[in-house]
Image (cartoon, grey):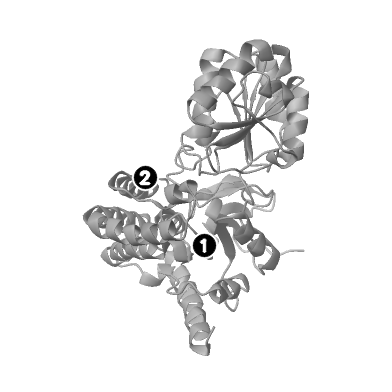
């Protein structure tokens, strides 16, 4: 990276810090106005965004990218409209800034309050999902944060077109344009400078991309990271399951969108009921065009099942492929998830509430579900409007990272002249 490029990144960092100070006291109405104006701008710019996305898609196809990658990258009019609606949904959320988490009074008369405040400046590094431009910028803004977005080369034209709409919204609301900045280079050294913290101007990093990107960020970042490595999600069908629920749920969990991090990658079936349950589940997946890689018991139910290799357990396929294994009840399912899962999202299908509660209590994942598709691992479905990512760590944020998770707190103490003896 040239000295000019380094200077550019440093300027981006300084401008973001200055913008964050303005956002700290920005009114709820101004933030809402910026996001609703950006949504209107996106609808008006649908042809331009589609054209930019076509350039990215053409390059991805020429590079031989897989179908799941293309699906993550694609923006059709329906998806652009969904992004615009997401901006409006975020604008309609309660403003977390200034909210009192708790308050109390000490015997000496001092009044204490724990109050939500923005994190400051958030860096988001992403690859093939251009919608992250809007989701991340909007969530950060509503939580009073400035954001620095660095798109990968795969989605840069789409990201630029979406970012232009966000800037239009900021201008309409008379908020600083530096509140949402898009790094104008795909040079990998820009990522290195962000990981170093941009001279102290970056407060947290959120990576959205493949395993190698997230691993690099977690290894090299000098600022806190909200991240997950992989979405190795499991659905366990217990002997107490209702098959009228289980079959459509499993199909949705795997095949609704195979390229999202909430897609089920491994199906576990209770061997205590596999004669009744395993065959229709496997057949339904195969008939829907899903490749099934199974253990010995699974291979016996249909000749189309391929033998599972050792590394299929714990693999994030992000494709029309699923690993299927029989287990001896809920405890073996829990043990398998503990060994091979990524603490992202895991589901149990059963009508036995006791078994369900055992699973929900003992599976240590950011999201655990009972009788619901793992594809609900999405901030919008949680009522967050959108999400920057699904955090699988234990510090500060876990699960969908929405507006509230992009705040911290401070203590406000009010007195009447008290001095400490």
Q: What residue is disc 2 on?
A: 89
Q: Residue at x 42, y 53 (%)?
A: 73
Image location of residue 234, percent across then percent down: 64, 33
318 or 389, which is in the foreground?
318
Q: Quarter of the image holding residue 189? A: bottom right
Q: Quarter of the image holding residue 291? A: top right
Q: Is residue 312 left or right of residue 170?
A: right
Q: Residue at x 59, y 63 (%)?
A: 204
Q: Residues within 10 Å of mark 2 (few under 14, many from 20)?
A: some
Task: Tell me the element at label 2.
Answer: helix
Q: Residues within 10 Å of mark 1 (few under 14, many from 20)?
A: many
Q: Which label was assigned to residue 124?
A: 1
Is label 2 in contact with label 1 (beta carbons under 8 Å)? Answer: no
45 or 11, which is in the foreground?
45
How many labels, in total?
A: 2
Q: Does any portion of residue 147 appear in the rendered image?
A: no
Q: Image quadrant for the N terminus? A: bottom right
Q: Does any portion of residue 316 appear in the rendered image?
A: yes
Image location of residue 7, percent across then percent down: 50, 85
Nearer the camera: disc 2 or disc 1: 1
Residue 357 in the image: above or below residue 157? above
């Amino acid at each position: 990276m040239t000295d000019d490029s380094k200077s550019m990144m440093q300027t981006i960092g300084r401008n973001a810090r200055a913008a964050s100070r303005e956002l700290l006291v920005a009114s709820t109405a101004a933030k809402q106005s910026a996001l609703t104006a950006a949504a209107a701008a996106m609808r008006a710019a649908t042809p331009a965004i589609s054209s930019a996305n076509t350039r990215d898609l053409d390059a991805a196809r020429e590079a031989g990218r897989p179908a799941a990658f293309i699906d993550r990258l694609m923006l059709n009019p329906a998806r652009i409209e969904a992004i615009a609606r997401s901006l409006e949904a975020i604008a309609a959320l309660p403003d977390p800034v200034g909210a009192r988490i708790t308050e109390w009074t000490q015997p000496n008369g001092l009044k204490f309050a724990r109050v939500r405040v923005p994190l400051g400046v958030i860096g988001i590094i992403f690859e093939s999902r251009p919608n992250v431009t809007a989701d991340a910028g909007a969530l950060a803004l509503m939580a009073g944060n400035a954001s620095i977005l660095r798109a990968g080369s795969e989605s840069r034209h789409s990201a630029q077109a979406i970012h232009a709409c966000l800037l239009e919204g900021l201008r309409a609301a008379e908020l600083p344009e530096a509140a949402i900045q898009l790094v104008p280079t795909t040079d990998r050294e820009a990522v290195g400078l962000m990981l170093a913290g941009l001279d102290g101007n970056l407060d947290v990093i959120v990576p959205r991309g493949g395993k190698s990107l997230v691993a690099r960020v977690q290894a090299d970042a000098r600022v806190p990271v909200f991240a997950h490595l992989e979405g190795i999600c499991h659905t366990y069908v217990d002997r107490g399951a209702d098959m009228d629920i289980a079959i459509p749920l499993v199909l949705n969990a795997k095949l609704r969108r195979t390229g999202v991090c909430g897609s089920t990658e491994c199906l576990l079936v209770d061997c205590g009921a596999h004669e009744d349950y395993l065959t229709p589940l496997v057949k339904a997946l195969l008939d829907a065009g899903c490749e099934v890689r199974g253990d010995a018991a699974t291979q016996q139910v249909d000749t189309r099942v391929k033998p599972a290799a050792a590394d299929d357990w714990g693999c994030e396929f992000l494709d029309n492929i699923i690993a299927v294994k029989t287990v001896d009840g809920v405890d073996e399912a829990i043990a398998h998830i503990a060994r091979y899962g990524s603490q992202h999202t895991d589901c149990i299908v059963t009508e036995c509430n006791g078994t369900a509660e055992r699973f929900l209590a003992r599976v240590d994942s950011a999201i655990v579900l009972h009788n619901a598709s793992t594809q609900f691992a999405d901030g919008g479905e949680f009522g967050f409007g959108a999400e920057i990512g699904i955090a699988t760590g234990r510090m500060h944020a876990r699960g969908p990272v929405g507006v509230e998770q992009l705040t911290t707190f401070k203590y406000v103490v009010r007195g009447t002249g008290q001095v400490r003896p």
